Image: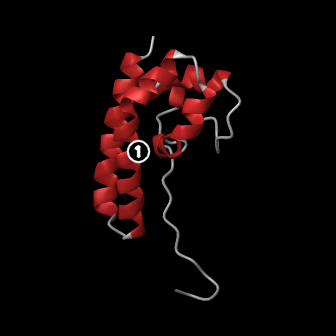
Amino acid sequence: MSKYMQLTVTVRPFYEGEMDGAYPKLARYLRQADLSLSSKNPSLYELAGQLESLLYHFDGTSLREILLRHGDKIRNTHKKIERNIGDRQLAQADKLLYTLEDIFDEIESDLD
């Protein structure tokens, strides 16, 4: 590793428009909350990494119950993505991002 430089891989959100277009129900919950997210359009990867905080913040809501049902899948997928990024297995990490999207698609469909 260089003494004065560092190679960085990031996962950025890439919604057509904003998160509201892809996940309107989830975005509505997030807008109502005062969360310390990096942007108003966080990536699903960022949300997965903050799962415990989301569970705490949304205590007593239907979102929390839905996140709890999907919690193990979210945690496991997020950990695998982190591991693959760290190992520079970016193609595998990308495949797992699709898996994470599928999980959040289920969450969106479960929300009222």
Question: Which residue is the extreme one toward the bottom?
Answer: 3
Left or right, 33 with reference to 85:
right
Q: Taking 52 as reference, is 83 above or below it?
A: below
As drawn, the residue found furthest toward the right would be 34
The residue lying toward the viewer, choosing from 80 and 90, is: 80
Q: Residue at x 59, y 38 (%)?
A: 53
Could one spot residue 41 in this view of the protein?
Answer: no
Question: Can you tell which quarter of the image residue 71 is in?
Answer: top left
Q: Estimate the x, y position of residue 59 in percent, counting from the top left.
A: 59, 23
Residue 86 picture location, percent across and down:
42, 68
Say if 5 sits above or below 75 in the image.
below
Amino acid on which disc 1 is placed = Arg
Q: Quadrant of the C terminus?
A: top left
Residue at figure coordinates x 36%, y 28% from the top left: 105
Label 1 SS: helix
Colour mapping: secondary structure
Relative vertical location of residue 80 with respect to residue 16 in this rendering, above or below: below
Height in image: 28 above or below 48?
above
Name of the residue lying farthest toward the top: 112
Q: How far from the left and from the top, in percent, is residue 108?
A: 41, 22
Question: Residue 92 is drawn in which quadrant?
Answer: bottom left
Within 10 Å of the Cα at label 1, are there few (<14), some (14-19), or many (20+) other Cα atoms? some
- Residue 101 quadrant: top left
Name which residue lies at 31% across and 49% down: 96
Q: Nearer the viewer, residue 60 or 84?
A: 60
- Residue corresponding to mark 1: 75
Tally the marks.
1
Residue 68 pos. (x, y %): 43, 29
Q: Is residue 29 visible?
A: yes
